[in-house]
Amino acid sequence: MKMTVQELAEIVGGRVVGDSGTRIERIADLINADQNEIAYVESEKVYSAAAESKASCLIVKDGTASRFADRTLIEVSNPKLAFSLIGAALHPPVRREATMHPTAVVAETADIALTAYVGPNVCVGEYARVGVYTRLEAGVVLGANVSVGDDCVLHPNVVLYDGVSIGNRVILHAGVCLGADGFGYVRHDLGYQKFPQIGTVVIEDEVELGAHTCVDRAALGRTRIGRGTKLDNMVHVGHNCDIGERVVIAAQTGISGSVVIEDDAVIGGQVGFGDHTRVQSGAVIGSKAGILPGKIVRPGVWWGIPIQPLEDYKRMNAHMNRLPQMREQIKRLQAEIEELRSRMNAD
Amino acid sequence: MKMTVQELAEIVGGRVVGDSGTRIERIADLINADQNEIAYVESEKVYSAAAESKASCLIVKDGTASRFADRTLIEVSNPKLAFSLIGAALHPPVRREATMHPTAVVAETADIALTAYVGPNVCVGEYARVGVYTRLEAGVVLGANVSVGDDCVLHPNVVLYDGVSIGNRVILHAGVCLGADGFGYVRHDLGYQKFPQIGTVVIEDEVELGAHTCVDRAALGRTRIGRGTKLDNMVHVGHNCDIGERVVIAAQTGISGSVVIEDDAVIGGQVGFGDHTRVQSGAVIGSKAGILPGKIVRPGVWWGIPIQPLEDYKRMNAHMNRLPQMREQIKRLQAEIEELRSRMNAD
Amino acid sequence: MKMTVQELAEIVGGRVVGDSGTRIERIADLINADQNEIAYVESEKVYSAAAESKASCLIVKDGTASRFADRTLIEVSNPKLAFSLIGAALHPPVRREATMHPTAVVAETADIALTAYVGPNVCVGEYARVGVYTRLEAGVVLGANVSVGDDCVLHPNVVLYDGVSIGNRVILHAGVCLGADGFGYVRHDLGYQKFPQIGTVVIEDEVELGAHTCVDRAALGRTRIGRGTKLDNMVHVGHNCDIGERVVIAAQTGISGSVVIEDDAVIGGQVGFGDHTRVQSGAVIGSKAGILPGKIVRPGVWWGIPIQPLEDYKRMNAHMNRLPQMREQIKRLQAEIEELRSRMNAD
């Protein structure tokens, strides 16, 4: 894939400074960039790296072109975003030809788009549906009545249990598991009886789930991941959770049953949610935080176990760091009182 | 599957009030229930939801029928348990016909029950044994000398390394991995020598393991999960652990080597166990807790890192919240002493 | 596999005491060892167990032979290391005959060593390369341009995305996933744009990765795991991390993007690293610790969230435990001041 600076600038609505005919083949970072590569300048901090960069074109912030003498530039309002869009244009995802691999095992009742790619050893269950241009990589298993939309990529060994439904342009990385039974039991005299797990999982458009992330089916009803939400690797989403749109959740976070996370929340890694908590839109939760069951997390930045507003957490930490000093103060007060007392007694 | 209220009541030993011939097709929750569906009433909190529910039958607590006028009811001592049992009757797990899928790769020396289901791309190693009515879903891999009991369900892509043994009525969700090498090395001058990991894993009857849960083989001897124990998704069980019967462990908990968890313990999510700890029967450990190596956890409720009795933890937290106040008090004392001293000096 | 005590002693450079012709078939621990088995004595703590052991040979520390009367012994400087080496000799890993299983799907352009084992349902992409004596177990998926060295073992269902490269004598346990996209997005008005993830993953010689461990590809450049490094189960390594040689990381630890861990660091389980942290050689980080983004972790032992030197952490904990006492002291001081004041007023 080769494009001119002019063509790339058009993709991102940017303004070209310098030679708009320069050919660009690849994206790169400032330091490692070479000829025919394009890099971006995020802030003044990297101006010296930019000056030394061998990139054939730099993406820079509007109004900063004068800082980069004798270079070919694309000026935009958000260089990192423009770089991402240009990266997607220069390095489009692998395209597979429409194929039904001879080793795939596909139920006769399944409805697979003619433009779909069905890789080696893929299994597709009864009445499953796969949309146009969707790629099912090697070893993917779709249960019965599964619905996969258009332009999706299911990486190797993804498993969708019966009845799970995913939208369009969804990316599921290797080993993602959707629709396993939720973790629910009723204790009785002899042990545990499984609580029914007969609901489903619904994944909306443009969701991306990291490798080995698991989303359990609802007990009754559905577990939902909203449009445009991104989950990192090894995230656990329990039964009946409702995760909104454009939510971001970092790796290894665990979400118990019936948790609601509203649109646009941002969640760090290794966070743990008790069941029935609700995270409101505008909340940001730091990594490793722990949220007690039933808690409502309001907008703002939160941290700690159990979580508290980040400012309170910092203040508490500062207090704790003063503990040795406080003990010293108490000792000194004691001595001073002793002294006063002996003076009084001496009087 | 359609059953009458009378038939369902017999399953759970309940008492019918109202029309025992009402036909029930599905379970549902109170709010979403519709005609021919059955729901349950767990406590007084949901009485108003129950009053408005369109369910054709409600499962209610013994002696409460009078609170639900003009409805068909089943009275039982534990409505949630009865609902679970009725759910299992109305929605039995998928039954697969006895099959050996042509794409399965099964060693000639393997012993597979004639009633077993061996799905697409399943691999079964030498001398492995699979019991009656057991289902091996697509992509399951059984190593050599593996033993799988009767009525088990191994969901897609489960991997059992050589020699692992599981009992009857065991459910392993997608991606479960049993018998990988334990994490043990001996440091020497040039790096790490692998400590031998030649033991095995034994899973007893009625165990259910969540998606992607991993149980490592013992170094020497065996790693055991006792009868009726339930593990959620992505739990890590290290080598040589001995987990008792009817233990419950929530998602993403990590258990280091040689940990003993006695019968009926209850463990939250994201808990971490140091090696050689012992959790006694009757212990309940809150989510995200951390247990130091070698610790003995007695009966009671525990929380924190390192864990302490929940009551101590709460008290400590209350003390910490009073830190700002304590600092104020110390300052005030200092001022008062100053005042006393100046008065004395003035005298 | 049967060997004499003499042969085993030669493997580890040890000194035989007693009958050097004794035949040994298996390793075992002191308590369960039986005839024709060899065990090791790590410290004086287990001398009584050693005395009662039925093992046909004990591996003991140099100069301690006199403590074990009438027994066949191998004296070495490090008994546990010797035991590990002898275990590897007596219980060598499964050897597979060179095979290309008929169900394997291998691209014509792939370059597979004639001595390699390619198991059932393995998929190998275009231009992939597999070295001599390497084993690809059932369901392994190698993308295009993947490079796997010599003498590697890839357990079932391992997935290597396009372009990933691993060295020689690497062991990847079941479900390991290398090269999934890193977790990077740029927020814009309508949601998140994926930041390009076009780098790769490089795993050096003698690395072992536990079941379900995931290492993401770099955005640009590469994510690296250095020679001889060992990761436990379900470890998450983010994009662009650089992990040195002989590093040890326990289960469920999560490493954000662009983290550097230098040679010989030791990391516990469930640790969380913020992005761009650097762990220096000689650092030891306790389980469940949390490291803030950008932090430099110097040599020494660290614990806590956020991490601090273990000694400081313990001191802080001790202070916290004295909080109730401090409150009492403050109350008493208050009373004493009151008393002094009233005496002064009375004067």
Image: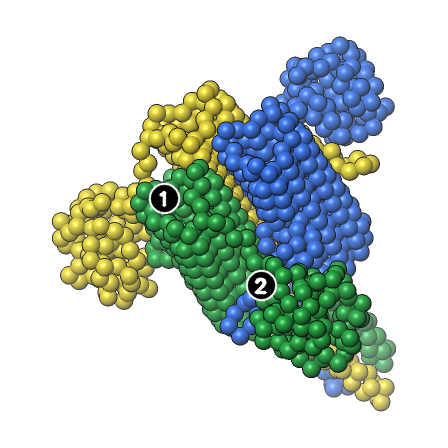
Chain colours: A blue, B green, C yellow
Q: Is residue C84 above or below residue A325?
A: above
Left or right: where A258 falls relative to B138: right
Q: Amino acid at mark 2?
A: Ala
- Image x and y of residue B282, in percent: 53, 73
Disc marking residue B89: 2
Depicted B192 relative to depicted C198: above or below: below
* Residue C210 vertical position relative to residue A345 in the rendered view, above or below: above
Image quarter of the N terminus of chain A: top right
Chain bearing mark 2: B
CA–CA distance between discs 1 and 2?
Answer: 35 Å
Which residue is more in the foreground, B297 or C296? Answer: B297
Q: Is residue C223 left or right of residue C345?
A: left
Looking at the rendered structure, which numbered label has been put on residue C230?
none
Residue plotted at (54% across, 64% down) = B248
Q: Secondary structure at mark 2?
A: helix
In this view of the protein, which residue sits in the foreground, C339 or C87? C87
Q: First in sequence: mark 1 or mark 2? A: 2
Where residue C334 sits, quadrant-wise, is: bottom right
In terms of depth relative to the viewer, which is nearer, A179 or B182?
A179
Residue displayed at 80% across by 83% down: C338
Residue at 78% in and 12% down? A20
In the image, taking residue C80 as reference, residue C20 lies left or right, namely left
- Disc 1 designates what residue? B125
